[in-house]
Image (tube, rainbow, N blue to C red):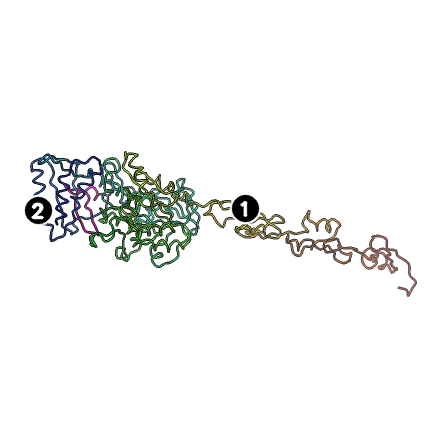
Amino acid sequence: LKLQFLYLIGVSTQAQPTTESTRRSAPAVVFALRMRASSAPLVLLLAAAVDGFFWPAGSGRKRLEFDYDTSDRNQGQPKTCDAVNSISGDYTTYPYYRNGRKQHVYLVGEQEEKSGFLGLTKYWETFGPLVGRKRFECLFLDGCEWDGATCRDGPCIGLSGAACNNDARCMETAKNTCIPKECTKWKTQGDCEADSACAWAKGSWAAGGACTEPEFAKCPAVDVTLFIDGSGSMMSLFIGQDMYAWWTMLLELKRWVRRLPMSGDDHTVAEQHGHPLDAGFRADVVQFSFPKNLFGDSRNPSYTHTKSADCGKNAHECTAGHLSGDVEELVGELDWMNDKHYLNGATYLGPALEDTVEKFEEASKEGRKEVAIIFTDGKFKDLAKSTYAGYPAEEALLNRVKAVVDVHAVILHPVGATQAAIDELHDENAHVVSEPVSEHMHITPVDRMKEVVFNKLCEEYVEPPVDECEPGQAGAACAAATPAQNCTDPNTDAGSRGDWACTCTEGTQVAGTGAASVATCTLDECAPGEAGDEACVKVGQSCTDPAQTPAPADRGDFQCACPPPRTGAVGVGRAASPCELDECADGAGHAECVMQGQACVDADKGAEGNFVCTCTRPGET
């Protein structure tokens, strides 16, 4: 109680802050006072007394209200587009929750400063106009559209089944919700490639690939753990005048997972130590904030994600802290984060790493790329350059993670942030990311995460081209065939495997052979122009080729046979010789001599027309 009172007095008597961040942090102590039920009335009384003493009533300021009722009096995230327009409240724009219990509220309006007793100045941050929350909640709901002032149903709202999928603007999710179309709508390569905004990613999905945006079409199998900063400063204005870093980050992450070629494995595959597909993305989300066991209070977790109980018995609900390749599970996880689970604390990363390090080590054995992306707007309290020496256990955890995972950091900064402030954040947080730092540290306004981070994520992990016809690759079987065959690989992208083909160098290729295998080739040596044609056919003999293959062992096995009525030994690999014709036994001599009762003599059976007929005496043959 004493500490709480001193904090209150300290903030109330503070000299005028000199920076935007200081002005923001000072009132955060007042607004975020942690009150136990037994002490809350007395603290409120003291707060009211101090407030009234230094800032007399009637100065035109709004009254500061503390809310120590931990019951859930807020309906949380709106469920329909029209419900967004009903968000209101003179004092409360976005109640913060810890573990599902409301902790405090914030004022609506502009930042105010009032001079009071002894010329002291009081500040509080009022976090921008209510329209900011309305715009976010509208865009966060699937299918809603924001027209600049109100939220309305988009063209896909109300459609289902065939009516949804037949509308070129829409697609149906696994939860049977109709939402604006993404490339993942298309399930066949033909449909995907017919959409100029999409690309077909080949892989081991059931359809032989998946439709996605071109930026992700060449991604290898990737597991991504998203660490998101739940510190109080994330609920500060980062874009224009009405959107805050926390809201925009959740919105961009939700849009991102909708566009990715996910593996399709739900979180139970990782939970039960199963083996995921060797294609597509899996992801999970962990919010980090407080140091471990702060206050010894379970209402103030060091980090947070859903548990199995949060996911219920229905499919596609959330990830329960495990990697998931199910789009709707990841969307459910982000919905859960938005709906009353913003920690609003500090920037301690270590406890979240402790929760995930063993998962990383196990997942890295699956042969998939393991990536961690840490989103923050400040330096890490335990792992920044100026602090990590005091946190050896957290440092050891970080080193374990970096040994198996590629660690990226995305530093979010307000529009108009000074270069000096950006450089300081880079220097302080460079210790956390993998080498080289230039490829793993991304500093960007929160509304440009897609262009700066997401669209380029796969560039680092796209493996170099692989020509499957090269020695050591599967297509080398073509060159090893007898005789050697030609090999072609039409797509040498690392993710494109099994599309090589062998073609015959000799003979005729049997249709349907040669795709990712040695081709079946035929060679008939009796065909025109081949050896049997020259040796047999062109000298009037018949030709047969028993093997009809181009293999050297089968070459020269053609057979030449004497044309009837000539007789003679079959010639193998050569003409039959001699091909003899006994004209007296068969042919003209038989007809001219024998049939006339004369004797026939054929002295040269290799020639024709040289038989001799002679008269015979009666009784002679």
In which quarter of the view is residue 616 placed? bottom right
How many marks are shown on the rendered structure?
2
Number of other residues with Cα within 10 Å of mark 2, as a class: few under 14, some 14 to 19, many 20 or more: few
Residue position marked by numbered label 2 in the rendering = 45
Circle 1 residues within 10 Å: few <14, some 14–19, many ≥20: some
Q: Give the distance between the C-alpha atoms of the residues marked 1 and 2, in whole angstroms.
A: 82 Å
The x and y percentages for residue 211 are: 40, 46
Q: Residue 7: x percent and y percent?
A: 15, 44
Is residue 601 located in the magenta-colored stretch of the structure?
no
Assign a secondary structure to mark 2.
helix
Give percent across and percent down for residue 390: 28, 48
Task: Give the residue type that dot 1 points to.
Answer: Thr
Is residue 89 found left or right of 246 in the rendered image?
left
Asked if the magenta segment contains residue 98, the reply would be yes
> From the image, which quarter does the C terminus lie in?
bottom right
Mark number, residue 99:
none
- Above/below status of 260 relative to 296: above
Determine which residue is flagged by label 1. Answer: 488
Secondary structure found at label 1: strand
Region rendered in magenta = 81-105
Nearer the observer, disc 1 or disc 2? Answer: 2
Q: Position of residue 619 (x, y in %)?
A: 91, 65
Q: Amino acid at mark 2?
A: Leu
Identity of the residue furthest to the bottom in this view: 619
